[in-house]
Image (cartoon, grey):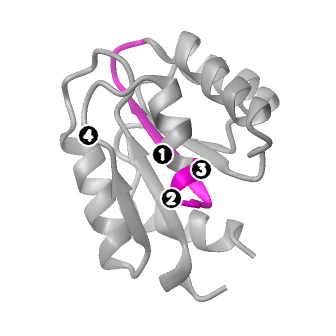
């Protein structure tokens, strides 16, 4: 697939008000030729999934620094299933304890990128994952 056609929705769910990292990722993905939709701060899982479906994205990128991932990840996964949109992959970044990563991957988070991950690594991962 031509990477210009890869569509990614970047979202800041919950009450987390720190969006610098999300904006850096959104810019890097856009600069690499992807179409990026940035939803802004304080998005509910319902808002995120609705926007992802409307925008026909390949990926939802969740940026979470608040520790609310234990609530948000399962809800987003559930809403994608309810809306028959399980083909949308979920990637996440932020503060996710390393010991939890295998559990989240098992239930439906495609990839988790921790602090310090290179934007090039994220871009390469997305490009490899979209066929």
How many numbered discs sit on the rendered protein? 4
Q: Which of 1 and 84 is in front in this view?
A: 84
Q: Which mark is residue 51?
A: 1
Q: Distance between the residues labelled 3 and 4?
A: 17 Å
In the shown orientation, is residue 61 left or right of residue 10?
right
x and y, in percent, of residue 42 in the image: 29, 24
Q: Nearer the viewer, mark 4 or mark 2?
A: 2
Q: Distance between the residues labelled 1 and 2?
A: 6 Å
Q: Which mark is residue 53?
A: 3
x and y, in percent, of residue 69 in the image: 51, 18
Task: Report helix, strand or loop for mark 1.
Answer: helix
* Residue 97 on the magenta segment: no
Task: Report helix, strand or loop for mark 2.
Answer: loop
The residue positioned 32% from the left and 58% from the top of the image is: 26
Q: Which residues make up the magenta segment?
A: 53-67
In the shown orientation, is residue 129 left or right of residue 112?
right
Mark 1 and mark 3 residues within 8 Å of each other at the beta carbon:
yes
x and y, in percent, of residue 93 in the image: 45, 38
> On the image, which quarter does residue 112 sit in?
top right
Mark 1 and mark 2 residues within 8 Å of each other at the beta carbon:
yes
- Pick whichever of labels 4 and 2 is earlier in the sequence: 4
Rendered view: 63 above or below 25: above
Residue pointed to by mark 4: 40
The 10 Å Cα crowd at callout 1, few under 14, some 14 to 19, many 20 or more, is some
Q: Quadrant where the C terminus lies? A: bottom right
x and y, in percent, of residue 125 in the image: 59, 64
Q: Which of 49 and 97 is in front in this view?
A: 49
The residue positioned 33% from the left and 72% from the top of the image is: 30
Q: Which of marks 4 and 1 is in front?
A: 1
């Amino acid at each position: 697939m031509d990477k210009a056609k890869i569509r990614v929705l970047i979202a800041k769910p919950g009450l987390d008000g720190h969006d610098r990292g999300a904006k850096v990722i959104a810019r890097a993905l856009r600069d690499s030729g992807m179409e990026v939709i940035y939803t802004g701060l304080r998005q509910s899982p319902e808002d995120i999934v609705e926007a992802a479906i409307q925008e026909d994205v390949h990926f939802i990128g969740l940026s979470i620094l608040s520790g609310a991932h234990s609530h948000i990840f399962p809800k987003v996964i559930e809403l994608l299933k309810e809306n028959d949109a399980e083909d949308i992959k979920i990637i996440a970044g932020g503060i996710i304890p390393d010991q939890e990563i295998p559990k989240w991957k098992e239930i439906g988070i495609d990839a988790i990128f921790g602090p310090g991950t290179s934007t090039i690594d994220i871009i390469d991962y997305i490009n490899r994952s979209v066929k």
